[in-house]
Amino acid sequence: MASTEVPGARSYIDAGNKKLDARSQNMLTKMEALQDTVENVKDDVLERHVSPKPQELRSINEGLMTVNMELGSLKDHIKKIKLMWKKIWQEELQSLVEEQQFLNH
C-alpha cells in the first residue's frame, strides 16, 4: 500500500514553494526598483544633463551587489531543494503506482 510519508513530504514541498516564491518575488521587487533608479539616473544624464551624485552611484552599486548575492543564494538554495524534492516526487509517483496496482487487482 501507499506510504504514509507522502502527505508530510507534500506539505514540505508546498511550504518550500511558498518560501521560494516569496524570496524570488522579493528579489524581483528589488531588481525592478534598482532598474527604475538606473533609468532615472540615465534620464538625468541624457535629458537634463545632470551628473549623478556619487552617493547615488554608490547606492546603485550596493543594490547591484545585494541583488547579485541574493541571486547566488537563491540558485544555491534551488540546487539543494531540487534534489530533495525530486526524491519526494519519486516517492509520490511510486505511491500512486502502488495504489493503482492495488485497485487493479
Image: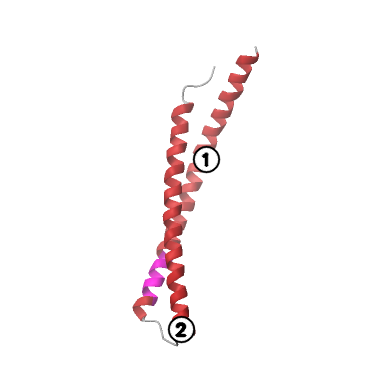
Q: Which mark is residue 59?
A: none
**Which residues are drawn in magenta?**
57-65
Q: Is residue 74 left or right of residue 58?
A: right
Which residue is identified by label 2?
45
Find residue 10 and report its horizontal and vertical position in percent.
Answer: 47, 32
Q: Which mark is residue 83?
A: 1
- Mark 1 residue type: Leu
Q: Is residue 78 left or right of residue 59?
A: right
**In front: label 2 or label 1:** 2
Mark 2, Cα crowd under 10 Å, few <14 / some 14-19 / many 20+, is few
- The answer to which of marks 2 and 1 sits earlier in the sequence is 2
On whether residue 50 falls in the magenta region, the answer is no
Mark 1, Cα crowd under 10 Å, few <14 / some 14-19 / many 20+, is few
Badge 2 marks a residue whose secondary structure is helix
Residue plotted at (46% across, 53% down): 24
Q: Is residue 42 above or below residue 97?
A: below
Find residue 63 and report its horizontal and vertical position in percent.
Answer: 40, 67
Q: Is residue 10 above or below residue 48?
A: above
| Residue lying farthest to the bottom in this orientation | 49
Q: CA distance from mark 2 to mark 1?
A: 47 Å
Residue plotted at (58% across, 24% down): 96
Q: Which quadrant, please, contains the C terminus?
A: top right
Q: Nearer the viewer, residue 14 or 9?
A: 14
Q: Nearer the viewer, residue 23 or 70?
A: 23
| Residue lying farthest to the left in this orientation | 55
- Mark 2 residue type: Val
Q: Is residue 6 above or below residue 48?
A: above
On whether residue 62 falls in the magenta region, the answer is yes
Dominant SS type (magenta) = helix
Badge 1 marks a residue whose secondary structure is helix
